[in-house]
């Protein structure tokens, strides 16, 4: 009986811990704004190839990312390019950020939100 | 079967690149290094009509006037000088058995860099300068050097320095093994890899002269002529091996072992594509 209680409370502690950790992970993922994800070298790293207003030392393998809302009124299209542009253009050198698990779907949406402000 | 599969991959790859106009390719159904060579050279000379052919060996400096100015400013005291001096000293220092590097090479190893890599018909493999240097050491009872550290860079820097201006003279004998090595190297060069999904050609064929951040991408034509290089980014010298391994890591791929047969095949392919261009190494790069 005592054993069962001990086991039960251990489970409870583990569950609480997991919930806290999970909440933290969610919170930190949500806290990353699209701009931070777009500029982070291990995430979007968009500036390596694209000029974006507000970013330093951009490369020029890809076009400048400006007037995005006018150029891509359908946000699904923009998200699809970030997810895997090789689908549309097999010769692109743009990494397939979604397909190769560099960015999650949520992160891609956050980046699209940010790009719509440029 | 493996060859069959490989040739399908090459055919698809070449077809795709030809469609996009990105690939300086010859016919896909046979291995034809001469036709590849012509297509490759035409591609770069058409892309950069104002760059003199022999200037391609200067990599990013041939494509960017501002960078060139900075390079010319430091070239009075080039950062690879110490490596050349050290390599010269190593060449002059006998092994424990009394022999030295010069005994392993034609012309005592002076002015021969343009002939590497070559296909060795006895062993059926591509021999690069770096591999030949380590085999020389081992044949004389010395431990081989790491392919990515300063000793190897110093030796190859000195050998390149004594060969400056000599045109690449890479031969592909009419031997199915040599042709296969060439083809494997070509295939590796154009195949995408890594989490970033880049091939070597993504940068050095599709985007030479363009900027990755502030870095100017070097053209594949002549890219091997400047090896080894001093890179400010590395704070030191880098061998051809180091360059290949870091490229693979940068695209978040899994690098091969330095001097892996495939890396040697890539060097064979690229060097053949640079035939006729002068050795410019050792080079200095940002």
Image (cartoon, coloured by chain):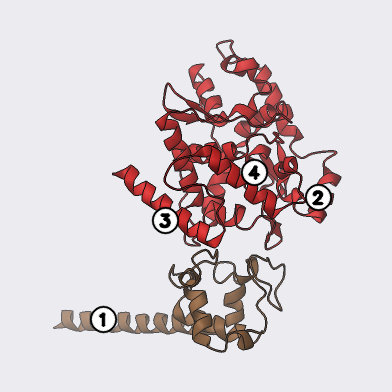
Chain colours: A brown, B red
Callout 2: few (<14), some (14-19), or many (20+) C-alpha neighbours within 10 Å? some
The answer to whether the residues at label 3 and label 2 have Cβ atoms under 8 Å apart is: no
Q: Could you tell me residue B189's position as x and y percent?
A: 51, 48
> Which circle, 1 or 2, is nearer the viewer?
2
Asked which quadrant contains residue B83, the reply is: top right
Disc number for residue A11:
1
Q: Chain of mark 3?
A: B
Q: Chain of mark 1?
A: A
Q: Earlier in the sequence, mark 2 or mark 4?
A: 2
Q: Is residue A83 left or right of residue B101?
A: left
Callout 3: few (<14), some (14-19), or many (20+) C-alpha neighbours within 10 Å? few
The answer to whether the residues at label 1 and label 2 have Cβ atoms under 8 Å apart is: no
Quadrant where the N terminus of chain A lies? bottom left
Quadrant where the C terminus of chain A lies? bottom right
Name the residue rendered at 62%, 29% in the picture.
B169
Q: Mark 1 falls on what kind of element? A: helix
Residue that label 3 marks: B12
């Amino acid at each position: 009986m005592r054993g069962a209680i001990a086991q039960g409370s251990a489970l409870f502690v583990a569950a609480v811990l997991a919930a806290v950790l999970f909440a933290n992970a969610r919170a930190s993922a949500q806290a990353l704004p699209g701009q931070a994800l777009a500029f982070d070298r291990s995430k979007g790293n968009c500036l390596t190839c694209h000029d974006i207003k507000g970013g330093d030392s951009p490369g020029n393998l890809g076009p400048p990312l400006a007037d995005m809302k006018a150029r891509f009124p359908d946000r699904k299209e923009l998200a699809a390019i970030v997810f895997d542009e090789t689908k549309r253009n097999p010769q692109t050198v743009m990494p397939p950020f979604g397909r190769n698990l560099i960015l999650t779907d949520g992160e891609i949406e956050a980046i699209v939100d940010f790009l719509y402000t440029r | 079967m493996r060859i069959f599969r490989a040739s399908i991959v090459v055919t698809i790859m070449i077809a795709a690149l030809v469609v996009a106009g990105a690939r300086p390719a010859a016919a896909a159904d046979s291995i034809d290094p001469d036709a590849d060579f012509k297509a490759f050279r035409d591609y770069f000379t058409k892309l950069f009509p104002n760059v003199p052919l022999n200037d391609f060996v200067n990599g990013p400096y041939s494509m960017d006037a501002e960078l060139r100015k900075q390079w010319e400013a430091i070239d009075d005291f080039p950062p690879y000088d110490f490596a050349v001096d050290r390599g010269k000293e190593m060449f002059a220092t006998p092994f424990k058995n009394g022999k030295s590097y010069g005994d392993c090479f034609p012309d005592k190893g002076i002015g021969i860099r343009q002939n590497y890599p070559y296909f060795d018909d006895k062993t059926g493999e591509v021999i690069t300068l770096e591999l030949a240097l380590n085999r020389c050491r081992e044949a004389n009872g010395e431990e081989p050097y790491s392919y990515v550290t300063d000793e190897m860079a110093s030796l190859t820097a000195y050998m390149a320095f004594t060969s400056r201006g000599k045109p690449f003279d890479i031969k592909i004998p009419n031997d199915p093994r040599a042709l296969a090595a060439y083809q494997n190297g070509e295939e590796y060069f154009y195949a995408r890899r890594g989490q970033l999904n880049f091939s070597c050609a993504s940068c050095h064929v599709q985007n030479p002269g363009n900027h990755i951040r502030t870095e100017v991408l070097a053209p594949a034509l002549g890219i091997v002529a400047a090896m080894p290089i001093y890179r400010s980014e590395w704070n030191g010298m880098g061998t051809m091996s180091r360059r290949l391994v870091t490229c693979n890591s940068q695209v978040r791929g899994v690098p091969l072992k330095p001097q892996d047969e495939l890396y040697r095949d890539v060097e064979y392919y690229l060097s053949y594509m640079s035939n006729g261009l002068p050795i410019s190494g050792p080079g200095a790069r940002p």
